[in-house]
Amino acid sequence: MSPLNVIDTGLERYTQVLQLQEQLFEESITAKLNAQPTKNYLVLCEHYPVFTLGKSGKRENILVSDAELEAEYYKVSRGGDVTFHGPGQLVAYPILDLDVLNIGLAKYIANLEDTIIQTLAHYYLKGERLEGAAGIWIRDKQGDRKICAIGVKASRNVTMHGLAMNVNTDLSFFDKIVPCGLEGKGVTSLQKELGKEISMEDYKKIFIEAFSGVFQLQDSFQLNKMLLSMIT
């Protein structure tokens, strides 16, 4: 198995983690162009409240003015439409070389979905795909509710951006948008589905184990905030 380097920034502003992503992404691109080995990174974080609009997103899917968002707002280079990130939500940004993993972009996204499905099974919840809509959903007689959003970017088969899993997220922020541009669809969280707050640290461990298994990578070490400050 190839090593997986996990960087956990904790609660951090979107722009700070985006800068880290871009640094690792560009390092991998440069390595590939120079026929050097690339490294596999998994950046984990929670964000201060922020809305992001993907490159194909529509401003009209943000239902309030910028002033009424009560959060930061950025247009970004990932696929997909508008979504929200905030405390209580685990955001994962894999920077992986898909050529080394010998998979294409469609398989990569399917692997991200499989990772979330496995973590939900740990809590006895059934995560499902919804045709035409990336991400993972809880589907039952109460309707379709998205619990994890996925939006990625790839260049030279190196990935960035990733997924956002609602663990203990304040879901009221989603009332300000049409999440992912999908009208009539709800959002949910582990906390809402289970009726209790979930330990984020426990969920991170479950997520890392599932991610490593799905992508057949070996979690080799974690970089804490002190080490993170040394590379940013």
Image (cartoon, rainbow, N blue to C red):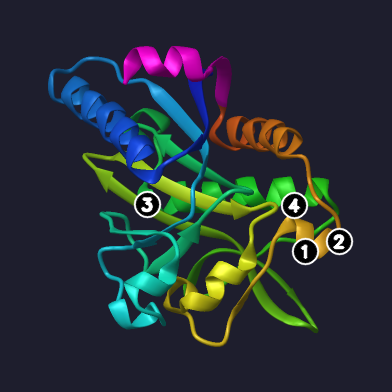
Image mark count? 4
Dot placed on the residue nearer the N-terminal end, 3 or 4: 4
Q: Residues within 10 Å of mark 2 (few under 14, many from 20)?
A: few
- How far apart are the alpha carbons under marks 4 and 2? 15 Å
Contact check, label 3 and label 1, Cβ < 8 Å: no
- Residue 128 in the figure: left or right of residue 42: right
Q: Going 31% across and 50% down the picture, which residue do you hit? A: 153
Contact check, label 3 and label 4, Cβ < 8 Å: no
Q: Position of residue 164 (x, y in %)?
A: 53, 52
Number of the label disc, if any, that sits on residue 145: none
* Position above or below: 198 against 95: below
Q: Quadrant of residue 229?
A: top left
Number of the label disc, if any, that sits on residue 152: 3
Segment colored magenta: 217-232
Q: Going 33% across and 42% down the picture, which residue do you hit? A: 15
- Residue 79 in the figure: left or right of residue 172: left
The residue beneath circle 1 is 192
- How far apart are the alpha carbons under marks 4 and 1? 13 Å
The residue beneath circle 2 is 195
Q: Amino acid at mark 2?
A: Gly
Q: Position of residue 80 (x, y in %)?
A: 37, 65
Q: Is residue 178 visible?
A: yes
Identify the element where label 3 is drawn. strand
Identify the element where label 2 is drawn. loop
Contact check, label 1 and label 2, Cβ < 8 Å: yes
Q: Amino acid at mark 1?
A: Lys
The residue beneath circle 4 is 120
Identify the element where label 4 is drawn. helix
Q: Going 21% across and 30% down the picture, which residue do you hit? A: 26
